[in-house]
Amino acid sequence: MPHAVWSGAISFGLVTIPIRVTAATEDHSIRFHQYHLEDQGRIRTRKYCEIEEREVSTAEIGKGFEMSKDTLVAITDDDLADLPLPTAKAIEIVSFVPYESVDPIRIGQGYYLEPDGQVANKPYTLLRKALERNAKAAVAKFAWHGRERLGLLRVRENAIVLHAMRWPDEIRSPKTLTPPAVEVPEDEIERALALMDALSSDDIPADAAVDRYTEAISDLITAKQKGKEPPHAAEEEAPTGAVVDLMAALQESVQKAKASRGDSAGDATVHPMPKKKAAAKKPAAKKTAAKKTTAKKTSSKKAPTKKPRRSA
């Protein structure tokens, strides 16, 4: 396990639980350095004083808030440590809510909370069991890295996990991004639901849990290190710009999804489809309008439905 990033306590009413906090996740991304193209020298960021025109050490650097161009308010680490906040020393539980009532967009980085010392084992276990039986998550407040935050406590296996959360005013509204009202026929919704059923599973599929980007970067580095030609992306067909039949695209997607899971070709075919498609052609003018409305959405989806065929 990584080293503790914070230590303090969980405040649960009048119960105090000493804990240590460690990161629950780790990043396996491949990192690149910046270098000088001419001689391959490393490019580094240096801390430079504009007035003295020299590089300074970390010990010479402090924090400050710029009130105006000529006024700076100095803030020390002691100032921050002495803030009159109970959450500066403890993760303070303020409420318990159903976990599903929390919008996932507000949930951020996860941390494991570990009991700190023998005396913390019993109250820690008490809180964990209470969370399990209550089937709720605890909303908490805590102050880290110069700001107070909202948090969500839940149980994962036998550990309590703290998730940092966004404040309500930090979530942008999607109203300006949503498209105008579009009429979608019921049979197209049913076909989309059939596709969702065909792609459903009890857990994240193993092939979806593979970081193909990192693997491709690793292969690229290895090839260039050995002086070989690096692998190249396959050429994709350019969108034709033609109006796509949404029902046909959904039907083909259902067939491919079922085939990829080993279903027979007979199971993948939906026999009532010809009747529904013919019925949809009745109002000719309305059908044309519907096609025009959905052209943008479907044309961008045409290429991805062909990808499995090429990679296979």
Image (cartoon, rainbow, N blue to C red):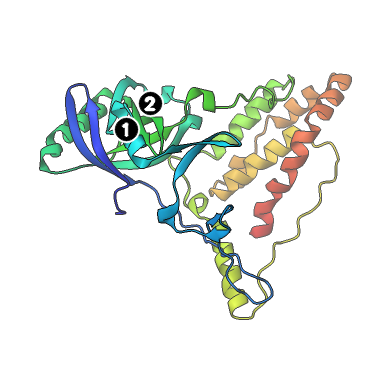
**Residue at the image position 46 percent from the left and 44 percent from the top:** 204
**Residue occupying the far bottom of the picture:** 227
Residue 278 relative to residue 159: left or right: right
Residues marked 1 and 2 touching at CB (< 8 Å): yes
Residue 224 relative to residue 203: left or right: right
Three-letter amino acid code of the residue under disc 2: Tyr
**Residue occupying the far left of the picture:** 119
Q: Residue 154's mark? A: 1
Task: Mark 1 or mark 2: name the one nearer the start of the chain.
Answer: 2
Residue under label 2, please give it. Answer: 99
**Residue at the image position 57 percent from the left and 35 percent from the top:** 196
Cα distance between the residues tagged 1 and 2:
8 Å
Residue 189 relative to residue 16: left or right: right
Label 2: how many Cα within 10 Å (few below 14, some 14–19, many 20+): some
From the viewer's perspective, is residue 241 above or below residue 136?
below
* Residue 58 can be seen in this image: yes
Which quadrant holds the C terminus?
A: bottom right
Quadrant position of residue 222: bottom right
Front residue of 102/18: it is 18
Task: From the top left corner, tell me how far across and down residue 242 is, in percent.
Answer: 86, 40
* Residue 162 can be seen in this image: no
Front residue of 32/212: it is 32
Front residue of 81/57: it is 57
Three-letter amino acid code of the residue under disc 1: Arg
Task: From the top left corner, tell me how far across and down residue 176 is, in percent.
Answer: 69, 24
From the viewer's perspective, is residue 153 above or below residue 52?
above
**Residue at the image position 24 percent from the left and 38 percent from the top:** 8
Task: From the top left corner, tell me how far across and down residue 212 is, in percent.
Answer: 56, 57
| Element class at badge 2 | helix
Front residue of 110/229: it is 110
